[in-house]
Image (cartoon, rainbow, N blue to C red):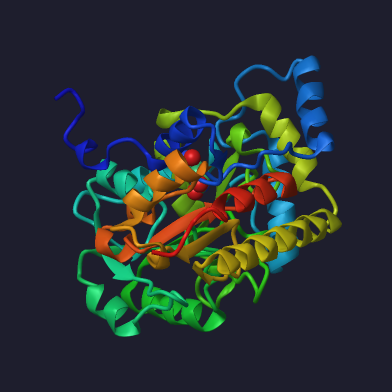
Amino acid sequence: MPVASRFQPFGTTVFSEMTQLAVKHQAVNLSQGFPDFDGPAFVRDAAIEAIRAGHNQYARMFGIPPLNDAIAARWNRLTGQNVDPNTQIQVTAGCTQAIPSVCLGLLNPGDEVIVFEPYYDSYRPCLAMADAVPRFVPLRWPDYSFDRDEVANSITDRTRAILINTPHNPTGKVYTRDELEFLADVCIRHDLLAITDEVYENLVFDGEHIRMATLPGMADRTITLSSLGKSFSLTGWKIGWVIASPDVIQGVRAAHQFLTFAVATPLQHGAVAALTAPETYYEEFVSQYRGKRDFLCEALEAIGFSVARPAGTYFILADHTPFGFDDDVAFCRHLVEEIGVAAIPPSAFYEHKEHGRSLVRFAFCKTDETLQHAVERLSALRPA
Ligand code: GLN
């Protein structure tokens, strides 16, 4: 077996697997979360312009100066903080590459990290790369709340960090202020880092996106990860970033410089155009997505699913039990092969796979026509 033992438990990522099946069966693809429409022309044009202007060599290791400036300026405007663009920001190849940079740069072998389950699929292998140990705390259907005692009981003298994803993929949960205050208190009392993946920060429909780094006492112990892909419908650009205290960023940079050194230069110039856009861009963006969420939630309920309406992200988790399948994998196989719609079997996001068995994840980052087409096909499902 040529695959190194540290990766053997993880197989092929479910996103590639399901998109391949969607292509094979010509299914409407509501599995992997990427838009089937293009990002804004003003951002694409800025990248094209940068290529023409000769911005084609290695970028500065931690990000081109105007991009670090733009990330810091928006962050500081939204939070009232005074993050320094040169010492507190690292630009990464998407948030997916920020995660191993954080894990490898800041965790020692045997360090424990609290991870809420379900979790985004790459967290687990990235912790494994760093020889760090996850301690799982479940988020429970249908509101995805967690038991505070379970968090408290998971802390040991090896615990180094809590990993939080808000808004949360795949559940659509947006952590409340009360929940984050509780977790902040745990971090402060036990001297832990909070690693917060906030890539869906601009996709909140109900409630408010609270940035962990803004809670009292948390600015220096929070590592905020975000990216361009979701907010600007440019997932293929792979531009992400890390915001943290100068000490913590040094750890992230220690790993980042040897993982990829620098990120695609012209696309960073495109990202500057994106991040200097007026806030009205985000208002229009979220309002379009709210319409898509409402349409798909209502349609899925009419077809017979029970739906936990997402407060954020572009994903919906639904319960497929009424259709009589053994588990999520069998249901998703039937869906892609017989119904012509691809979705994600959520057991991929669980350590305790049984908790994902009755669920299915649909992505709604698709044109209204695509969603309509998917719903027409899903209407062929019959209760068992
Ligand atoms: N974040 C996307 C999703 O959850 C997929 C990212 C990827 O394909 N690696 O669907």
Front residue of 97 and 104: 97
Taking the image as drawn, is residue 255 in sight? yes
Q: Give the side of residue 160 with respect to residue 65, left or right.
A: left
Front residue of 149 and 55: 149
Can you give x and y, in whole percent of width and height, for residue 308 in the image? 51, 71
- Locate residue 75: give its quadrant: bottom right
Front residue of 295 and 302: 302
Q: Give the side of residue 138 with respect to residue 40, left or right.
A: left
Taking the image as drawn, is residue 97 in sight? no
In the displayed image of the protein, which residue is found farthest to the left?
1
Count of number-bearing discs: 0
Location of the N terminus by quadrant is top left
Front residue of 340 and 107: 340
Residue at the image position 40 percent from the left and 76 percent from the top = 188
Q: Give the side of residue 322 with respect to residue 22, left or right.
A: left
- Locate residue 369: give its quadrant: top right
Can you give x and y, in whole percent of width and height, for residue 367 in the image? 72, 45
Can you give x and y, in whole percent of width and height, for residue 103 in the image? 36, 48
Q: Give the side of residue 172 with respect to residue 204, left or right.
A: left
Location of the C terminus by quadrant is bottom left
Rendered view: 201 above or below 210: above
Rendered view: 117 above or below 47: below
Residue at the image position 57 percent from the left and 56 percent from the top = 379
Residue at the image position 62 percent from the left and 33 percent from the top = 237
Residue at the image position 82 percent from the left and 53 percent from the top = 281
Can you give x and y, in whole percent of width and height, for residue 294 in the image? 68, 66
Rendered view: 96 above or below 49: below
